[in-house]
Amino acid sequence: EVQLVESGGGLVQPGGSLRLSCAASGFVFSRYWMSWVRQAPGKGLEWVANIKEDGSETYSVDSVEGRFTISRDNAKNSLYVQMNSLRADDTAVYYCARDAGYWSGGAFYSMYDFWGQGTLVTVSS
Amino acid sequence: AIQMTQSPSSLSASVGDRVTITCRASQGIRNDLGWYQQKPGKAPKLLIYGASSLLSGVPSRFSGSGSGTDFTLTISSLQPEDVATYYCLQDYDHPLTFGGGTKVGIK
């Protein structure tokens, strides 16, 4: 059974740092792109960042560029996001998601088929 | 970044009604689009990928269509368990972007 379990959320002051983890099980972690998606309280979903199977490529949304770093440890079946210089508008539930994407006709199609339960990050003084 | 404009933002329909949600991209995205369902307090669930491919296990009353800039999610016969918020997600280019969501309720 595929499982994704996030941890590391909590209350942090503005300007502070936090590292979220996502423990994966039930599938061959090293074969999948992985992503972080967040949702501010009462708001919609926002894609945050993703990372290639071997960690050689990463992408992130402009609002976290230079502050958040996505990484992975395939030996530990774990995904991470290091969040620095946190702001109030980073307050959200953070989900990790598996991308069971596939190639077709020369294009890569993403599909987030499994998600964790989310971990809440609150940035407040 | 590609903007995804979803409409309506909310709707209310009767059980058995046909429901249509649309998503418009600010530029062409081929068929690189997925639809997700999120119930309160829960993680999103994938329904449709590649604009029109139904994920295995998802009820056949859900369908997706469209290509380029205009996309549609249709629920052919709304059921009580379909009460949720629905989001489109473009994966044509980084950063990936979600639509604003459509909250679906029962009359």
Image (cartoon, helix red, strand yellow):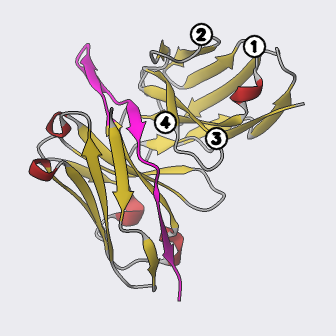
The amino acid beneath tag 2 is Ser
Q: Residues within 10 Å of mark 2 (few under 14, many from 20)?
A: few
Cα–Cα span, label 4 and label 2: 20 Å
The mark that comes first in sequence, 3 or 4, is 3
Q: Are marks 1 and 2 in contact (CB under 8 Å)?
A: no
Most distant residue in the bottom direction: A125
- Provide the residue designation for mark 4: B89
The residue carrying mark 2 is B60
Residue pictured at 41% horizontal, 47% vertical: A116
Q: Chain of mark 4?
A: B
Counting labels gives 4
Q: Pinpoint the chain carrying mark 2.
A: B
Q: Amino acid at mark 4?
A: Leu
In the rendered structure, find residue B77 and report the number of the disc placed on it: 1
* Alpha-carbon span between mark 3 and mark 1: 18 Å
Q: Chain of mark 3?
A: B
Marks 2 and 3 sit apart, C-alpha to C-alpha, by: 19 Å
**Viewer can see residue B10:** yes
Is the residue A72 above or below the residue B64 in the image?
Answer: below
Residue displayed at 27% across by 45% down: A24
Q: Earlier in the sequence, mark 1 or mark 2?
A: 2
Q: State the CA–CA distance, disc 3 to disc 4.
A: 17 Å
Within the image, what quadrant is residue B20 found in? top right
Q: Position of residue A18 (x, y in %)?
A: 34, 74
